[in-house]
Amino acid sequence: MSAALSTPSVRAGLFPPPCAPLRFADGDLYEWPLVGDSWVRTDGEWKPSPDDGSGHLTDAEVRASLHRAAIAWGTTCRFVPALPGARLPGRPILALPTTHNAAQYVLDHQEDRLVPVRDLVAVHDEDAAYDVPGVITASATAQVLSGIVTEHDPVRVRYDQPAGRIYVRYQRPNDFGAWGGEEFAPPVECLHVFVLTDQGA
């Protein structure tokens, strides 16, 4: 049994999207879970999924909607960044972008998608999740990255400037495997994605 199977999936509707991203990338999702509507960004525009021919959305329209939801604590829509492939996009990071705050997303193994950190915290402690900021400053992002690099080896860190994202991937021991009787449980792969934003922390 893996740690992923032991953790409930993140439920939608508790928190608003943390921010409106600075930029988008193909494969991103814009969802309204309560009504079942979903758009996927393809070739630079947002198309319904499945595409029913009802029309497309622009980046500006999606950004404005996410910004309104984040400001008004609207919980009906959400943004799901595209998962990177086996090779992280972008270039090895030399210096963090210092002009933008960021929303931190992490991999939800149960759903195999990226979710905001506070949503994942809420799975285990809903009250504690309200103390987790949706957006952190550039200096706080640097501190989180420094902590990950210090605690784990190896760590892959890349900055994808066109998508406005910092990707961090590493492995940690599968502690649950030992509890579940698996003497040599495979490590758990962790993925953090910092989505840059112009919104305040």
Image (cartoon, rainbow, N blue to C red):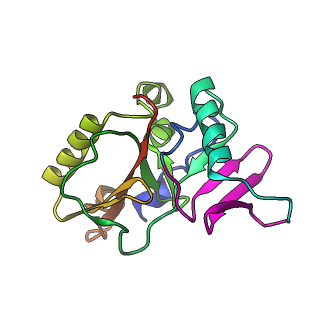
**Image quarter in which the C terminus is found:** top left
Whether 28 is among the magenta residues is yes
Q: Which residue is located at x 44 percent, y 37 percent?
A: 198
Q: Which residues are magenta?
A: 23-52
In the displayed structure image, the side of residue 48 where residue 122 appears, left or right = left
Q: Which residue is located at x 28 percent, y 41 percent?
A: 141
Tell me, yes or no, if residue 52 can be seen here: yes
**Residue 113, percent across and down?**
52, 58
Instruction: Name above or below for residue 65 compared with residue 91.
Output: above
Q: Nearer the viewer, residue 78 or 58?
A: 58
**Residue 72, percent across and down?**
63, 24
Q: Residue furthest left?
A: 150
**Image quarter in which the N terminus is found:** bottom left
**Residue 117, percent across and down?**
43, 42
**Residue 22, percent across and down?**
48, 46
Whether 191 is among the magenta residues is no
Tell me, yes or no, if residue 181 can be seen here: no
Q: Residue furthest bottom?
A: 86
Q: Nearer the viewer, residue 67 or 190?
A: 67
Q: Which residue is located at x 63 percent, y 38 percent?
A: 64
Q: Which residue is located at x 19 percent, y 45 percent?
A: 147
Q: Where, by quadrant of the figure, is residue 174 drawn? A: bottom left
In the displayed structure image, the side of residue 69 where residue 88 appears, left or right = left
Instruction: Name above or below for residue 128 compared with residue 188.
Output: above
Q: What is the total number of numbered labels drawn onto the structure image?
A: 0
Instruction: Name above or below for residue 55 compared with residue 115.
Output: below
Q: Nearer the viewer, residue 83 or 51?
A: 51
